[in-house]
Amino acid sequence: MILKNIFTKIFLFLLAIPLLLHAQNRVKVEGIVIDENLKPISNVIITVQSSGSAAQTDSLGKFTLQLAPGSKILYFKLLGYTTKTVQVKLITGQDFNITTTLRRNLKLLAEVKVEDKTSRNQNMVRLNPALINQLPSVSGNFESILKQLPGVSVNNELSSQYSVRGGNFDENLIYINDIEIYKPFLIRNGQQEGLSLINPDLVNSVKFSAGGFSSRYGDKLSSVLDVQYKNSDTSRFQIGLGTNGVSATAFSLPGKLKYAFGFRQKQNKFILNSQPLVGSYDPQFYDFQSLLSYDINKKVTLQALGVYNTSRFGIIPLSQTTEFGTLQQAFRLKVDYEGQEVDSYNNVVGALTLNYKPNHKLNFKWINAAFFITEKETFDIYGSYVFEEVNNDFGGPNIGTIKTNRGIGAYQNYGRNQLEADVYSSEVRMLYSRKKMLWEAGFKAQKDVINDKVKEFSLADSAGFILPNNANQFVLSESVEAKNQVSTTRLSGFLENNYEFGKFNLTSGLRAYYNNFTNEFIPSPRAILTFKPHANKDLIYRLASGLYTQQPFYREMRLFDGKVYQQTKSQKSVHIVASSDYKFRGLGTNLKFSVEAYYKILMDLVPYKIENLRIRYYANQLATGYATGLDMRINGEFIDGLESTFRLSLMKTAEDIVGDSRNIKDANGNISTIYPGYINRPTDQRINFSAFFQDRLLKSPTYKVHLNLLYGSGLPVGPPKAPRYQDVYKIPAYRRLDIGFSKNILDPNARHQPRLFKKYLDSFIIYAEVFNLLNINNTVSYLWITDVDNTQYAIPNFLTARQLNVRLIAKF
């Protein structure tokens, strides 16, 4: 612990040295770039002749540079505009302000729209990475912003896991710079989760699809998240300090060799201390990432990505008091604990990408990656409890006193689990473009080796029924001991064509895969048809369909007893998605309205239960199912310069498990067979609503308010070890409101800017946030106990309470 803290301070100190040296004897150059219509232009690159300095304009067209005194030549460049050269003379001690106009180059401007047009044609939503820092979020992870997107379900603010359109956490593809990444396997709850692999400070662009995505993306049932990192930035250094941790990033300037380094440390003890479970928490989460890119020549670029992500979670629980019930009947559970839990999750990633572009039409990419994942769980916790019914006579003298003792008991959870996963992959991709046609192809070989050791048991002694009354029949409610090794070779490839004809655009492709565990070879055809009826109206319609398959990785193979089921097959889904989005002018600003209706046919499903964040598969069972729904979203800058978004998702998903019929004997001894048929899937969350709204506080341009509202209707749940058809209860709806306030001390519109800050910093933003403003007790799971009358009760496990957070972000 001490060594880690010392290392953190040394790292930040070393990172600060070049910042201070960089700031000496500099003149601050501030400016704004506009077009012929006097509108600000964002993303303009400003470089300085014979210097490594560079800048980029923000959404308001503004930029800042720190330069040495003397005569300088500035170049203003943006694709679609004619490059402009400006000569300036800088004097020591005098700031320099400049306004520059760029003129459109109609020939090049068409290229600017290609990226956005391609995303829309391929049924992808583009996200603004700048929103990540503005969103008030308990976890601080990048995935928090996804909860504002259509089709994404929400029910846990501590976790970076998410489900999409009736799928579970395992059904989502995630890429960083075209490299597929993997989530932890053994995570049971959000407390254990540390920092997700995606570093928000390094993100350059984000694309997301909730279904009906193209063949270039791999083999999962639900969604794809495509993240691209940046390795150069106008602000070379950024440091973040907050109640829950620190972060630091360093970027190179544009050049032949480009790099980015990121460090994050998370210590969310304050958040965890607000939970009902009282104890000594010891969460320690660290993440180091680097991205290097070297232009060997004009045609060849070599890029290397390195990640070291480590999470350690420890807790010595002491006690917990949970009050629940209704107006008619109130209960209280008091638990005293003994023992402790120590978990660790380590993920090391190394990737090397060679990019070769022989001409402007052809591009080759060779991607090599290796993942080394090590996860350990060690816990031995004994809890003794008293279960009471409480007097709830409001206004009476005995309110809150014990009315009836419903029972006493104890439970114990023990585990010594370890999982190691090594994943190696090599992929070749080719891209060939013509005027109205784009071809893309790829082939990937992957080898993954899983070593898993499981040894755990749980004991529930509700109301003393097991001990001491039945001491001669010591029964464990669950006991698992297994040792597994699974080695799988996977081959996949795809061929995709994008063709534009008239008002239509067709993206069609074929993907195929094979693995030697299931010995399946499955082709996966996919197609997306886009229609734009009006040349002068930004309205498009899309129809997407395809077969999506998901090979078993490991968790889908493992039975409840820890053994691997050798007959596991790939799960399959047919997506049918009809969608439209419309960009228009409304409320005095530019807005975008999107709507999607979908139906998914689910085949060869492996049923499962979700216990908090732990997914447990019935590996030896199969099911068929469906998911259908409607997603709507409107987003835009309702307030100038501040993007907001609102979305509503309606969804229904169900499955029919093969062979889940049961025989029932009536009072006369007659036996009848009951067929449950279609039952709600564990992710059947019918309604999801989210809103992220930003405004200027008190009509001041420098004070901002950020509001994050989330609602998700109840989820199906049932007693442990019960068949799936008995999951007929509901976890209460998830309701949460987070609010944040921010001020950029160096905002160009600020009346007063501290000279010392202005001299050395590009921006200095202070955030004050209140998590769970309404202090709502959201339920994430249940503890099931039985009272003296043999009545079973579900005791809710609550998520985080109201909490204040403060953080600072400084850019140099």
Image (cartoon, rainbow, N blue to C red):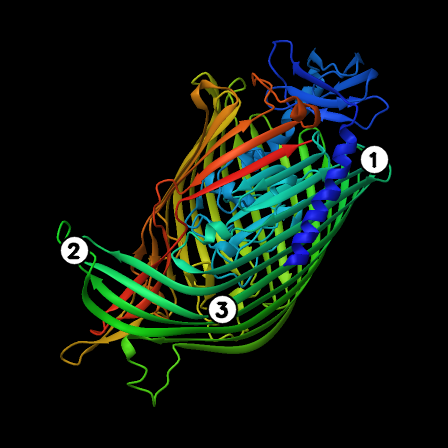
Which badge, 3 or 1, comes first in the chain's sequence?
A: 1
> Which residue is drawn at the image coordinates 51% and 39% (left, top)?
806
| Rendered position, 331 above or below 788 | above
Q: How far is mark 3 from mark 1, CA to CA? A: 52 Å
Crowdedness near tag 1: few (<14), some (14–19) or many (≥20) residues, C-alpha within 10 Å: few
Which badge, 3 or 2, comes first in the chain's sequence?
A: 2
In the structure shown, which secondary structural element does the residue marked by tag 2 occupy? loop
Query: Which disc number belongs to residue 328?
Result: 2
Q: How far is mark 2 from mark 1, CA to CA? A: 72 Å
Is 545 or 277 nearer to us in this picture? Answer: 277
> Which residue is drawn at the image coordinates 44% and 65% (left, top)?
317
Relative side of 374 to 409, left or right: right
Residues tagged 2 and 1 counted as in contact (Cβ below 8 A): no
Q: How far is mark 3 from mark 2, CA to CA? A: 37 Å
Task: Tell me the quadrant of the picture where the N terminus can be found.
Answer: bottom right
- Measured as percent of width and height from the top left, residue 51 is found at 83, 25
Relative side of 88 to 504, left or right: right
> Which residue is drawn at the image coordinates 45% and 54% (left, top)?
273
- Measured as percent of width and height from the top left, residue 714 is found at 33, 51
| Rendered position, 66 above or below 482 | above
Label 3 sits on what residue type? Gln
Residue at label 3? 340
Relative side of 213 to 261, left or right: left
Residues tagged 3 and 1 counted as in contact (Cβ below 8 A): no
Residue found farthest to the bottom? 472
Task: Tell me the quadrant of the picture where the C terminus can be found.
Answer: top right
Label 2 sits on what residue type? Gln
Residue at label 1? 256
